[in-house]
Image: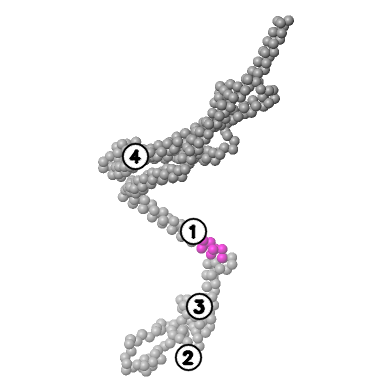
Amino acid sequence: MALLDKATDFRRSATKTMSERWQTFSMPGAFRRAKEAMTGPAKMPHDPLEDQRAELVELDALISILGTCASTLSTSVDMLAAAPKPLFDPLSRFYSQGMPGSAAIQRLCLQMDGFASHVKEHEAEMEALQNKLRGLSERNRTVHQSFSSRDAAWTSQDHYTKKLEKLRDQIAKSGSSSGLVEKLNRNEEKKRHSQQEFATRTSETGRQVNEALSNRWQEVGEVVAEMCQYYTVVFQAAGTLRQELQQVCAELTKPSTTQALARMGREIASQAQETANTFVDSLRARCSKWNEGEGTGSGPLALTHQYRSSRSSSQEAFSSEGGEIIEGRPVASGYSNGASWPAAQGWPVPSSTWPNEAMGAQQSQPRSPWDTKDRREVRSPWG
């Protein structure tokens, strides 16, 4: 009987021990930390530093773009300055001393080499600018790491807070035990440590993010100003180079005397041909218009026929009035037998005969058939 009682007590004790162990079982911390390493710590909901965190991300993106721009600018200018260098020796050999354009080629090589040297002198400024941008990026990366550590501290605090709530609920439902009480006390201690860690991380992260964001406009403005200064240096050298290159271009493209004369002759011939073509086109247009007017009585043949008919009518009218037609021209009666006009008087007329004798001499002279004074008018055959 005693043996049976001992067996029953042992069974009850084992059952109670297994139940307490199951009630106090939880996921080991190693598993939880491994999960966080793979998925990353969870972010705190309603984080008071969330706005600063977003502004830091925006600043990082701008710094990255500025760094890419500075690197591309420096590389592009170096390539621009180094591009013509392989041409210097072949061009110098091709345009040897005394050849046409040799002086211009020498000036070209000197100016290009001077531009490359001028740009090379300011490479240190762009390198310092890129180092500054890298420093800003490294500082912001440290702030991001501080945010990650703070997230991990908050995750640990949230874990122990939820774990304690479950243990308290379990004790309230199934009663207290030494194992549960010990586990409860142990997790409360861990929660206090996680809270202290989270508070420390929050304070440090807030300080770092405020330092990074407080001078962001000034820091970015200085970077942009240095880039503008570099552009100014490059464009100033390019402006000086532009004038020299224009002169070199004019010298290299200047034609010889024979070529200039030949080109001038071609231009003159082309202008003459255009003028002749214009005149011929105009003459053809006029002739076409005249030919089109034959059917309407306004063409050249119709006008000639009208003129001849009018002239014949005028001659017949003149003959019927006593005039004569000699060699197709009207002659007044009395002048057809070789009569001629009296010789003209000398000029000026002597004062002794002026004006009476002069007037009398004029009255004794035969009068022209076209003089219609004191006689009836003689009509011209043309109208």
Determine whether the residue tagged by mark 3 lies in a helix, strand or loop.
loop
Name which residue lies at 54% across and 26% down: 37
User: Which residue position is annotated with label 1?
Assistant: 281
| Among numbered discs 4 and 2, the one appearing first in the sequence | 4
Choose mark 4 or mark 3, whichever is in front.
4
Mark 4 = which residue? 120
Total numbered labels placed on residues in the image: 4
- Colour scheme of the rendered structure: one colour
Instruction: Provide residue 32's location: percent of width, then percent of height.
Output: 58, 24
* Three-letter code for the amino acid on which mark 3 is drawn: Trp
Q: Which amino acid type corresponds to the residue marked 2 in the rendered image? A: Asp
Q: What span is in magenta? A: 284-293
Question: Horizontal and vertical percent for residue 51?
Answer: 54, 40
| Nearest to viewer (mark 3 / mark 1) | 1
Task: Please tell me whether mark 1 sits on a helix, a strand or a loop.
Answer: helix
- Residue found at the very far right of the displayed protein: 1
Secondary structure, mark 4, is helix
Image spot of residue 140 (x, y percent): 47, 36
Measure how far apart labels 4 and 2 are at the Cα level. 111 Å
- Amino acid identity at mark 4: Lys
Pointers 1 and 4 in contact (C-beta within 8 Å): no
Query: What residue lies at 44% left-to-right and 38% top-to-bottom?
Result: 136
Q: Earlier along the polypeptide chain: callout 3 or callout 2?
A: 2
Residue positioned 29% across, 37% down in the render:
93
Image disc number at residue 374: 2
Tell me the tag on residue 382.
3
207 or 182: nearer the viewer:
182
> Gap between marks 3 and 1, in whole Å?
35 Å
State if disc 3 and disc 4 touch (CB < 8 Å). Answer: no
Real-space CA distance between mark 4 and mark 3, rounded to the nearest whole angstrom: 96 Å
Residue sitting at 54 percent across and 74 percent down?
Answer: 309
Mark nearer the viewer, 1 or 4:
4
